[in-house]
Amino acid sequence: MPKFQLFQKHRDRLADGIGGTYPEFMVETLRGKAELKNPINESLTRPWLKHFFIACALREKNRQDDIIIRDKNLLELFKTTIPLSDNSFVESTMSSWKMFIDSAFRESDTPWYNGIRKTLVQERLYSAIEQLELEPPTSNPQNACQFYDHENELRKVPRIPIKLLFSLPGNEKEAILEILRRAVNNNPHNLDVALLAYCFLKAWDRPMDFLDIARTENRNDLEEWYYWVENDLNSLGALKRDAHDYTTSFFIYDRSQLSDADYKELADWFLKESEFKAAYHFYYKAKEYETALELLQNISVREFGKLTNQRRISRNEKPIDPLGDPSRFISLYQEEIETLRGFARIRAAERYRQVSVQARQHFDRETIETKYAFGELSEDEYNRLIRQLQERKQ
């Protein structure tokens, strides 16, 4: 350390530390307590040291000017933790953010889904923001070195509370977003960069901005993942339908809350695509029992067994081994046919009552004839209504 620094005042060294001119060297401790001085890497290490001195100044006196300096320095510090052309992409492992990302996300238990299965646990995200600290990247060779502070004490490179970055004001917040956009663009194969960008935008209540990034970068995988992590199953299902991914479409729509009309439209699409098992399943969910019964009677027990296991997987249940008990699928098949027939009979009785009331109200033979002609009445129901009409006239 140069001699003139020995006689500097405490506040002078603190000011130089904030300005980025003090200290001049990082100290590497060798065996036998010998010290090796290394020039400071100005782009990768200096922002971390500056943060230490700024924090010290803020503890002594919380001045607005120092807060502004701290926030601007946090942007430079942030750049050292993610892979950018500025740091020659050395931080591609994102070691500084690894614990944070692992804390905020979990792997979804959906083996049927072939996209990115990471899902955000919002409570854990907010907990990680509040509790975790950011460490210098392991890719920085000076991360284990020490430095002399303004009181000539040997210090380790500081860690910073993650919430400082998430609490940045407007202009700095937009700068963080721009850095993340650039990182996503520069690192198309680094999923952690995208996950981190989503964390910031989710915490700022701007998740749609992530969708804009995905579309701007033509990242179909991230657009699909956005719908997945936001639980927008209808939009995700539309993407899978466009890709003719019938199996994934089945699982997605089976977990969606759709109206009967939407389920029928979906069933019609599966039928048009000759996906008969899925078409039957969604006609059933649409309460189109007559159509479902007709389809089921043309599906083999073997195919019904596959459908049964798809349903079980969708409910996170263990599939049935078709070789373990072959008769079980036959039994389930017969039970489902009888259930559908029962629903069809109930539907026919309800329809008969509706038409019967209408016929009694209007006393109109033409109405009965028309409904019979269009198949809305069975022959027995038609004859019964005609008899009632005749009895009423007598």
Image: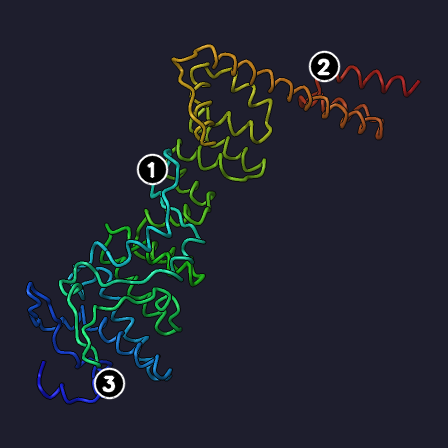
- Residue 252: which disc? none
Q: What x and y, as percent, mark residue 229?
A: 41, 48
Residue 319: % across, % down: 42, 23
* Dot 3 crowding, Cα within 10 Å, few <14, some 14–19, many 20+: some
- How far is mark 2 from mark 1, CA to CA? 51 Å
Placement of the N terminus among the 4 image quadrants: bottom left
Give the CA separation, mark 3 to mark 2: 98 Å
Which numbered disc flags the more N-terminal residue, 2 or 1? Answer: 1
In the figure, residue 303 lies in which quadrant?
top left
For residue 22, above or below residue 326 = below
Which label was assigned to residue 114?
1
Of tags 1 and 3, the one toward the viewer is: 3
Give the foreground label among 3 and 2.
3
Q: Is residue 353 left or right of residue 304?
A: right
Dot 3: element: helix
Q: Which residue is mark 2?
A: 379
Closer to the observer: label 2 or label 1? 1
- Residue neighbourhood size for the residue with mark 1, other residues' Cα within 10 Å, grouped as few (<14), some (14–19), many (≥20): few
What kind of residue is marked 3?
Ala
**Residue drawn 24% across the image and 56% down it:** 94
Disc sitting over residue 15 in the figure: 3
Question: Looking at the image, is mark 1 or mark 3 earlier in the sequence?
Answer: 3
Q: Amino acid at mark 1?
A: Asn
Q: Residues within 10 Å of mark 2 (few under 14, many from 20)?
A: few
Point out residue 225 in the picture as x, y percentages from the top left corner.
37, 47
Label 2 element class: helix
Q: What kind of residue is marked 2?
A: Glu
